[in-house]
Image (tube, rainbow, N blue to C red):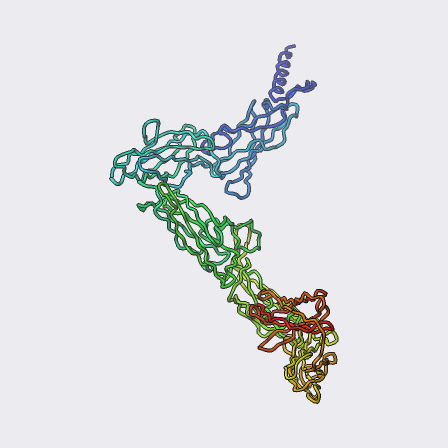
Amino acid sequence: MLRTPRVRSLAVTAVAALALAGLPLAGAAAAEGDPVTTSLAGASADGLAFDVDENGFGDITVSAKDQSGAEISMAFRTLTYHWVVRPFAGGEPITTDEQTTLTGVNSTMVKFPGGQPAGTYELYAALSAAPFTGEGAIAEAKVLTIKAGEADVTWRLKGPQQALAGDFARVDGVLALEDGTGLEGRPLDLSWTRGAETEPDGDGDAGLVDGDQLVTGLRVTTGAGGAISATVADVKETPQPAELGGTLDAASPFALGGGVGAEADPQGVDFLKTLAVGSVTIAAETPLSVDGKTPGRPVSSSVTVKSPTGNPLANQKVRLTTDKGFFTTHATTMAGLTPAATPTAGSDAGAWKNLGASIEATTDGDGVARFTLAIERDAGFDDDGRVDATVTASATGPGTTTAVTDTEVVDWTTANPFNGGKVRLEPAPAALQQSGVLPKAPLSDTVVLDVVAEDQFGNPVAGETVTLADDATGAEIDVASVKTDLVADGDVTLSATAAAAQKVTGTWSTETHRWASATAQAPAGSENVTGDYTAEWYAVDPAASSFSLVSDGEGSEVGQAVTSTYTATDQHGEPIADLFVEFFRAGPGSQGGGEAAKSELTGQDGLVDYVFVASEPGEVRISTVGRSGSAAGSPVAQAAKSVSFDYGTVVVCRCSPIAAVLKGPNNGPKADRLRVITKNAAVAGAKVRLFKYVDGKRKLVRTGTLNGAGNWKTKVKDTNGKKRTRYVAVISKTESTTGARTNFRLVR
């Protein structure tokens, strides 16, 4: 019985401990809804963002919450915690060593980690189980997120700010951490240092507005987002002097127990006699690369704005425009440029952030606004590899009725490109080609190519060496390499002696500039850029080719010249060159003799003309024989043709006369489009021949038949570009209509 009081005392102590630990009594069923510890929560007496100088021991605490979110006692337990610091400056997160402490009844103080960089601080904590019962443990979780660093005051505008003499200037600033998070509710002491008056000279009298008086010192409290604001006023005087050199400073007041400890760079405020814009001057551009001003290599420059009295105007808005290229984020080095998109390692550098062709810049305290100009693809480079971009700067100010402007020309070039893009091997203009069915070409022809080097943006580049090679036996390239130019005048000639697909490859060894990572460029390197063209050489197949012989002798008068035209076209529709054609004429009468009257090789047009004049009427027969390459060549059986007609014979015909018109539009280097129009259905089915005049000679180029309406249309390959070609058409007579000759038509 003597022990009874002690036993009772121990029991009471255990019950009290369980209650303080936030748990129901052991051995007894907890009533429904009894509070139990379920989570932890952190709190900061300095707010969720603070200067590290404000923090003191005990400012960071952790408390327990029950299932309803209310605080609950957590005494007699162990709190384990650590911090994860995510620096504002970037880099890997920092995890502090784990700490343990005994919990208090309602909350437990934890240490803020010292010596860490400014950044976001995350507190992770866990709570041990309650004594006696072993229940109520809380697993580790993030319980608090705060920001901490060294706060400073920054001013909204660049200094010195400017206002008219005798007027006032509002000076705005913000107290913020390194990442821009503002600190609200902190006191700051503002101090004003007066400048000097000029015109006339004197001591400065401007000051901080405090009610109805001007002072040199003033305490303010930061508002939302850490903002502060003060007004500096200049005394109105007659005459009104300018006041220059005044400065406003801000600092945290001394505070027991620690304060923000913030400072600021003094903000200058000048009171000028005029804020009107007197001059705008653009400086000559500075290339960011020693390798010149090219697409991918921007230039930087600046524009200076001054008042009519020559004072630099600070915080002045300047509108900048360019007629070529675009503005990019200002940089003073190539390494400082901002890419258009997040780079990937190994990708080409040179594409920079595009801010557009018009931007607004703001001058600094020296009245200078800086900008950077870039260019990529521009059609102006195509003719000479050069583009002149005109940059215009304009500004207005109080008292300025019209904008004051200046211009500067930036001369861009594609020479020595930042990165190579591609090599193009392409057919030269049609006037330089022998084949009209490229990439196919008969062995009798040559193929002429232009070689073009392009930078990474598609601009042509002159002066680059491209080496040439092919993979075909029996084919040749006339040069081993070419220097690129910007003229489509033919750079290389291909030929072949055997049917083959001749793939010609051009290789350009050029400098490269690439990204080593998302933030850094690799050292300059080199690469081979290639392009190719395949010429499809073929041998003429006489069996699949077309040969014809036509004459305009029908109905000719005695003594009139008759032209017979021989045409050879291969299996691809290409005129056959170098076919040796012999003409034999018999008649009229004993004339002609049947011997060879003419022999000639067909040219690139596949044509040969034979002209004769006879002195008597009669039947005429003209025959041809074709041989491969020369008079000694093998006969081509399919090339043998003949034509007969009555020469000088008077034919009585009760035929209806017809009128025919030849029309054709001017369409430059495209194929000439010709139409023969009679508007007479009676002549339907009549043969029509189209001739063109080359070097004064008439050559047959097309034959056809009039349609049911008495009309006919055709196309003829343009072989002289934009020059004029003279055409005429002849319609043969029918049983019911006379023949007809159209007007002459000149087509460009």
When asked about the image quadrant of residue 688, the answer is: bottom right
| Foreground residue among 181 and 140 | 181
Q: Position of residue 581 (x, y in %)?
A: 68, 82
**Does residue 733 lie above or below 100 as drawn?**
below
Q: In the orientation shown, which residue stands out farthest toward the top?
A: 1
Q: Position of residue 639 (x, y in %)?
A: 72, 79
Q: Quadrant of the N terminus?
A: top right
Is residue 365 visible from the viewing direction of this image? yes
Q: Position of residue 315 (x, y in %)?
A: 39, 42
**Does residue 486 lie above or below 307 as drawn?**
below
* Image side of residue 649 versus residue 195, left or right: right
| Foreground residue among 223 and 296 | 296
Is residue 671 visible from the viewing direction of this image? no
* Image side of residue 579 versus residue 53, left or right: right
* Image side of residue 542 versus residue 256, left or right: right
When asked about the image quadrant of residue 227, the answer is: top left
